[in-house]
Amino acid sequence: MRSTNRLMPRLAWRLLALVGASVLGATLLVPSAAHAAPPFRFVPVELICYTTEDFHGADGAYIRADARVYWPHNGVVYMNAGSIHQFAASYALGFHTDIKLDLYDQDRGIWDDDDHLGTIWISSADADSAPGPNDNPDTPQREIMKLFLSDDVFYALFYFVERI
């Protein structure tokens, strides 16, 4: 009888955990707006460097999107004044409302943090702000340009936002 008394609470807790997990599982499987497919796509076209942060040599450029490294997929892209980087289609990024993009110049010293070269915001409103020629929704969208201007640099990002 003594072993049965100790076993019952364990079985009760396991049963409660199993019921709770199945209820939670059923709740978690219900799609919500936060987990729905993104209705917009950010499509970068090109990044142009007009002025570098470094007085000598190229910037080791990379972009973080909402605090995660976004471009390039690994390493950095070295950009001098006059450099133009054209983005591959793989850099299109789905989103819901807006994306924060931060441009950095990678510094090599362990005591020197990477230089923040500016922040821009990509918004779902951009999908409506740059319609195609003659405001015809059936024609390709014009590119939008935003500038990274912090730390004495001048970079221009050309992109468009499309509805998915």
Image (spheres, helix red, strand yellow):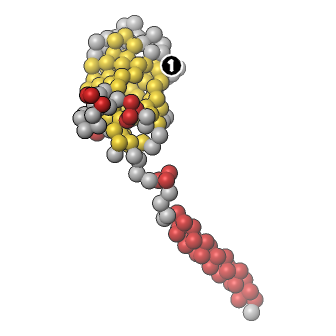
Quarter of the image for residue 87 reads: top left
Quarter that holds the C terminus: top left
Q: Position of residue 151 (x, y in %)?
A: 48, 13
Nearest the viewer among 9 and 79 is: 79
- Single out the residue that lies furthest toward the bottom: 1
**Can see residue 60?**
no
Residue sitting at x 50%, y 51%: 34
Q: Vertical placement of 162 versus 51: above or below? A: below
* Number of dots carrying numbers: 1
Q: Vertical placement of 37 versus 148: above or below? A: below
Q: Position of residue 9 (x, y in %)?
A: 71, 80
Q: Position of residue 154 (x, y in %)?
A: 39, 13
Q: Position of residue 127 (x, y in %)?
A: 37, 35
Nearest the viewer among 38 and 12 is: 38
Residue sitting at x 49%, y 34%: 67
- Single out the residue that lies furthest toward the left: 139
Quarter that holds the N terminus: bottom right
Q: Amino acid at mark 1?
A: Asp
Q: Vertical placement of 27 versus 98: above or below? A: below
Q: Which residue in the protein does label 1 denote?
A: 112
Q: Secondary structure at mark 1?
A: loop
Nearest the viewer among 157 and 69 is: 157
Q: Is residue 110 left or right of residue 56?
A: right
Quarter of the image for residue 153 reads: top left
Dot 1: within a 10 Å radius of its alpha carbon, few (fewer than 14), some, or many (20 or more) residues? few
**Can see residue 9?**
yes
Q: Vertical placement of 124 versus 107: above or below? A: below
Residue sitting at x 27%, y 19%: 84
Residue sitting at x 39%, y 46%: 39
Quarter of the image for residue 96 reads: top left
